[in-house]
């Protein structure tokens, strides 16, 4: 007897789709990365909780992550995950806004530091769990350990790339929090967000050796696919009417021809971009490595304790990127919190850190990050999920 399933998402890898079966989500793909971050019983989550408690942030500092239960298929790639159960946020109050601002800052820090990407708004849920804890989390974690230097690379904040700027602004993951935080956010809450971002990065830096040791001991570290996106899903969907540039690769054409959205992956510590070559997923093909072909960005090295020269940029330039994303012309003057002081001048932003260090940059940061304050409100709802069909008043999806 076959059990009824509800198909979810796109078709990948010879017709495989995420599906819903009896209250559980069936995912026919690698689940290691999601389990590490979305199960409270994973060794990484326990390490983070204990470090946060020990360093004074409180054991619930990472409580914005859910506690999902995973079961792995013995015969195929993937397995099942409990379906997330959240209630919508209550009507915004000063306490909820401040709490959510801190959660947003910690979330930006965590995902940026771990090199998790593809955190667009459709991949994020926001609500309250059975404990009364606000949860702000991705549902899919397929790309991890990228050596990021800016939080925009997670897709939580809008990338300023002129070719994709408007699409990026609409899809930015932090748009999920705007109905609660407001447009614009209150300056006190923005400072709380920035302080939480800095404090979380500092905690993760101090724990980098332990986290690296934990990851290096994972049995599946070098065998678990890390997804590689060669181009957006929309480009594949419209490829017949609007041939993309650069032109489609043979491997992309073959996958589209059989009705799949092309899926590629890399393996940690190994070279090459791969795709599955036959329906059992036992054999893979590797894209050419020479000529006009996609190239892989570097990953964080567990052998180096996850330390990288980009960490400094993530702390300093990332701080200004966060300020720039939430900046607003109405912000003026000097504003202080326990963690930071920010001066909003006509043309510059000045940040003074607790130890007296002073950082300054031009206030116009449009070359690095887009504003989260879109004139439209498409999809900006207090619901747990983004509406299935989200059409911008300006005609953009």
Image: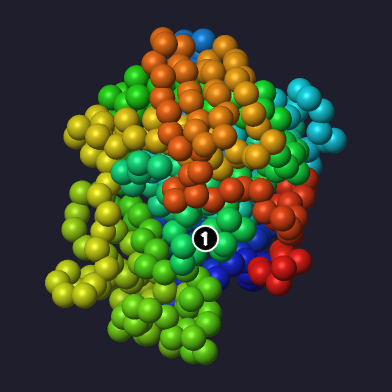
Quarter of the figure with residue 314:
top left
What residue is rendered at 34% in x and 19% in y?
A: 206
Q: Label 1: state its secondary structure.
A: helix
Quarter of the figure with residue 311:
top left
Q: Is residue 274 above or below residue 380?
A: below
Q: Is residue 97 left or right of residue 200?
A: right
At label 1, counting other C-alpha atoms closer than 10 Å, the crowd grade (few under 14, some 14-19, many 20 or more) is some
Residue 107 visible, this orientation? no
Q: Residue 344: horizontal and vertical position, in percent? A: 57, 29
Task: Depth check: give the residue in front, 204 or 243.
Answer: 243
Q: How many labels, in total? A: 1
Task: Depth check: give the residue in front, 32 or 53.
Answer: 53
Task: Depth check: give the residue in front, 185 or 43.
Answer: 185
What residue is rendered at 53% in x and 79% in y?
A: 237
Q: In this view, does 67 lie to the left or right of 132?
A: left
Q: In this view, does 238 lie above or below 16?
A: below
Residue 336 visible, this orientation? yes
Q: In this view, does 210 lie above or below 285?
A: above
What residue is rendered at 40% in x and 35% in y?
A: 317
What residue is rendered at 66% in x and 68% in y?
A: 397
Residue picked out by circle 1: 165
Q: In this view, does 156 lie above or below 4?
A: above
Q: Is residue 164 left or right of residue 326?
A: left
Q: Residue 156: horizontal and vertical position, in percent? A: 53, 47
Furthest residue to the left?
A: 290
Q: Residue 79: horizontal and vertical position, in percent? A: 50, 55
């Amino acid at each position: 007897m076959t059990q009824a399933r509800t198909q979810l998402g796109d078709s990948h890898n010879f017709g495989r789709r995420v599906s819903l079966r009896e209250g559980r989500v069936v995912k026919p793909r690698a689940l290691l990365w999601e389990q590490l971050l979305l199960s409270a019983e994973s060794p990484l989550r326990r390490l983070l909780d204990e470090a946060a408690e020990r360093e004074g942030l409180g054991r619930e500092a990472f409580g914005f992550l859910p506690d999902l239960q995973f079961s792995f298929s013995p015969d195929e790639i993937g397995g099942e995950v409990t379906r997330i159960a959240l209630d919508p946020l209550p009507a915004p109050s000063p306490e909820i806004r401040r709490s959510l601002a801190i959660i947003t800052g910690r979330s930006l820090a965590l995902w940026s530091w771990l090199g998790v990407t593809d955190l667009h708004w459709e991949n994020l849920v926001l609500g309250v769990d059975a404990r009364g804890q606000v949860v702000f989390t991705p549902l899919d974690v397929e790309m991890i350990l990228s050596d990021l230097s800016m939080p925009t690379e997670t897709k939580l904040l809008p990338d300023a790339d002129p070719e994709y700027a408007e699409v990026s602004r609409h899809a930015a993951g932090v748009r999920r929090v705007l109905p609660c935080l407001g447009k614009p956010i209150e300056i006190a809450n923005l400072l709380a967000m920035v302080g939480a971002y800095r404090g979380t990065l500092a905690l993760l830096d101090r724990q980098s050796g332990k986290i690296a040791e934990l990851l290096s001991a994972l049995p599946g570290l070098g065998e678990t696919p890390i997804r590689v996106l060669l181009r957006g899903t929309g480009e594949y969907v419209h490829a017949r009417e609007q041939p993309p540039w650069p032109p489609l690769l043979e491997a992309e054409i073959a996958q589209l021809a059989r009705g799949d959205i092309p899926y590629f992956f890399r393996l940690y510590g190994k070279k090459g971009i791969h795709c599955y070559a036959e329906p059992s997923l036992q054999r893979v093909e590797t894209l050419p490595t020479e000529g006009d072909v996609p190239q892989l960005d570097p990953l964080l090295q567990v052998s180096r304790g996850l330390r990288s020269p980009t960490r400094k940029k993530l702390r300093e330039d990332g701080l200004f990127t966060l300020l720039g994303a939430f900046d607003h012309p109405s912000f003026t003057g000097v504003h202080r919190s326990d963690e930071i002081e920010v001066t909003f001048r006509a043309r510059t932003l000045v940040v003074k850190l607790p130890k007296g260090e002073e950082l300054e940059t031009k206030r116009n940061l449009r070359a690095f990050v887009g504003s989260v304050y879109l004139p439209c409100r498409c999809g900006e709802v207090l619901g747990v999920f983004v509406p299935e069909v989200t059409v911008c008043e300006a005609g953009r999806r």
